[in-house]
Amino acid sequence: MRLIKGIRTKPLRMIPDERGRLFEMLRRDEPIFLRFGQVYCTTITFGVVKGWHYHKKQIDNFVCVSGMIKLVAYDSRPGSATKGLINEFFIGTHNPMLVQVPAGVYHGFKGLTDPEAVVINIPTEPYHHQRPDEYRLDPHGSEIPYDWNRKDG
């Protein structure tokens, strides 16, 4: 898949033993790390879409730690070499991966696991409750050429 300019991924290596498993999500001594803003956990119910939105400053680092999600990114940045490109990532229990979404790229995700999936985000900026760096569109509107419905066949 051709990636949107600025999108980066990192496969997560599972380290299992008789007690369970461990995987590192993001380390400050690896090239994908930029800076630390905060860490938060969100859940998404099966079939629900959280999106579309983008940030002007913030870069997101998503990992689905339980269940599965479909994370979708759309590049609408003027002058971008990948303007108009859409990327889909199926991440979570069956495909452990970190997906880094750059500032200016619309993104959202859909819950694929019943009853829910659990997502960790490590953004580069702390959330500003009075002035959120968040610009939203309707996930089912016509501004972005993407259909969140399941693709059977």
Image (cartoon, rainbow, N blue to C red):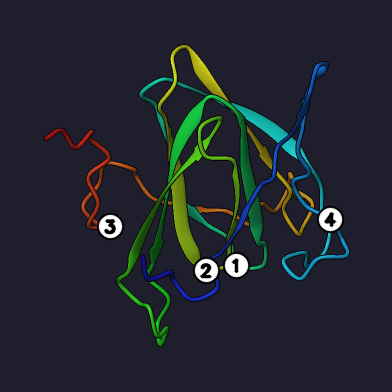
Q: Residue at x 66, y 53 (%)?
A: 61
Give the total of numbered labels.
4
Mark found first going from the N terminus, 2 or 4: 4
Whether tag 2 and tag 3 are in contact, CB under 8 A, the answer is no
What residue is pinned by disc 2? Answer: 104
- Crowdedness of circle 4 by 10 Å Cα count: few (<14), some, many (20+)? few
- Are discs 1 and 4 less than 8 Å apart at CB? no
Precedes in sequence: disc 1 or disc 4: 4
Residue 131 lies, in percent from the top left, at 70, 53
Q: Quadrant of residue 35?
A: bottom right
Q: Which residue is mark 3?
A: 144
Residue type at tag 4: Arg
The quarter in which the C terminus is drawn is top left
Q: Which amino acid type is marked by label 3?
A: Ile
Q: Give x and y (percent) for residue 16.
A: 75, 28
Q: How far across and how far down the image is residue 102, in percent?
A: 58, 66
Q: Is residue 118 left or right of residue 32?
A: left
Q: Along the horizontal axis of the image, is 121 left or right of 115?
A: right
In the rendered structure, which amino acid carries the disc numbered 1?
Lys
Which residue occupies the foreground of this view, 14 or 48? 14
| Disc 3 from disc 1: Cα separation | 18 Å
Circle 4 residue: 27
The amino acid marked with disc number 2 is Gly
**Dot 4 or dot 3, earlier in sequence:** 4
- Marks 2/1 in contact by CB < 8 Å: the verdict is yes
| Closer to the camera in the image, 64 or 23 | 23
- The disc at residue 56 is 1
